[in-house]
Amino acid sequence: MRPQTIGLMLLLGGCARVDQAREPRAPADAADLHVLLAACHRGELGDALCEHVEQAELQRMMSGASGTDEYRRLEQLPPIPASFDAPVEARP
């Protein structure tokens, strides 16, 4: 091969690595993902990072990695929505 061809291949290969290094990465920890997802819903983070966080959360949920021991502290639990059922006493 000619030296120009090898130099061009090395130059283009180096450019691809720079683009990958600049790509934002989402954390794998469930608690950190929940914090970042909440920040995304409030509009505090950029679109690119929010897309990566949502993709990481989806992959984590679909892989079966989430479980009952996912949360380490009570503060990490997501809020429980109010029930739409009537209280037991009010039911006929």
Image (cartoon, rainbow, N blue to C red):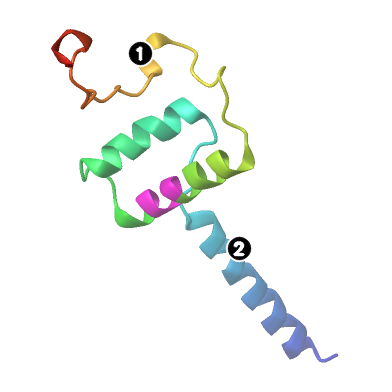
Disc 2 residue type (three-letter): Arg
Residue 52 image position (x, y, % from top left) = 45, 51
Q: Quadrant of residue 6?
A: bottom right
Which residue carries the number 2 mark?
17
Residue 3 image position (x, y, % from top left) = 78, 87
Which residue carries the number 1 mark?
75
Verify whether residue 57 appears in magenta: no
- Residue found at the far front of this picture: 92
Distance Cα–Cα, label 2 vs label 1? 39 Å
On screen, residue 33 above or below 58:
above
Q: Quadrant of residue 79?
A: top left
Residue 35 image position (x, y, % from top left) = 35, 30
Which quadrant would the C terminus be assigned to in this image?
top left
Q: Residue at horizontal 55%, vertical 60%?
A: 20
Highlighted magenta segment, given as a residue range: 49-54
Disc 1 residue type (three-letter): Glu
Q: Residue at horizontal 54%, vertical 55%?
A: 21
On screen, residue 23 above or below 19:
above
- Residue found at the far left of this picture: 90
**Residue 82 located left or right of residue 77:** left
**Residue 89 located left or right of residue 12:** left
* Nearest to N terminus: mark 2 or mark 1: 2
Which quadrant would the N terminus be assigned to in this image?
bottom right
